[in-house]
Amino acid sequence: MTRTDLDAAAARLAARQHGVLSRRQALAQGRRPPGGPAHRRGRRRRWHTRVDDVERDRRRDIDAGLLGWTVVRFVWNDLVERPEWVCHVVATHLRRAA
């Protein structure tokens, strides 16, 4: 799978799941990229939900660790902008676990 294939798959997944475009996708389509004033207002409205989500995620990570799992977290931009690095991190964790 090439970087272009991965970008295309990521774009389809983002559009299907969230109906959002990455900065690169928006610019490629001649649209305004995320991060403008309207985007920031939306973030404020979701703040409390996001804090609750983060706390729930951390508790879930701790529970997974107690069961012997290794949790590795990536943000969307890691997957879109640095897929080779993401693959390296995952491969390193798998080698260490073997």
Image (spheres, grey):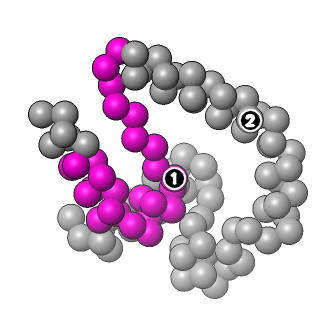
Left or right: 2 in relation to 14: left
Frontmost residue, 98 versus 84: 98
**Residue ranking furthest to the left:** 98
Image quadrant assignment for residue 24: bottom right
Q: Tag 2, which secondary structure?
A: helix
Query: Which quarter of the rendered picture does the N terminus lie within?
Result: bottom left
Labels 1 and 2: the sequence-earlier one:
2
Tell me the chief SS of the magenta region: helix
Q: Is any atom of residue 12 visible in this view?
A: no
Q: Mark 1 belongs to which amino acid? A: Val
Can you identify the residue that label 2 sits on?
Answer: 51
Q: Write the start and end of the magenta stretch as one range.
A: 67-92
Circle 2: residue type: Val
Q: Is residue 87 magenta?
A: yes
Q: Is residue 20 magenta?
A: no
Inter-mark Cα distance, 1 to 2: 16 Å
Asked which quadrant contains residue 6, the reply is bottom left
- Quarter where residue 98 is shown: top left
Q: Please tell me how crowded label 2 is: few (under 14), some (14-19), or many (20+) other residues with Cα within 10 Å.
A: few
Instruction: State whether residue 8 is above or below residue 19.
Output: below
The residue depicted at 24 percent of the width and 70 percent of the height is 2
Residue 18 x %, y %: 60, 49
Q: Which mark is residue 75?
A: 1
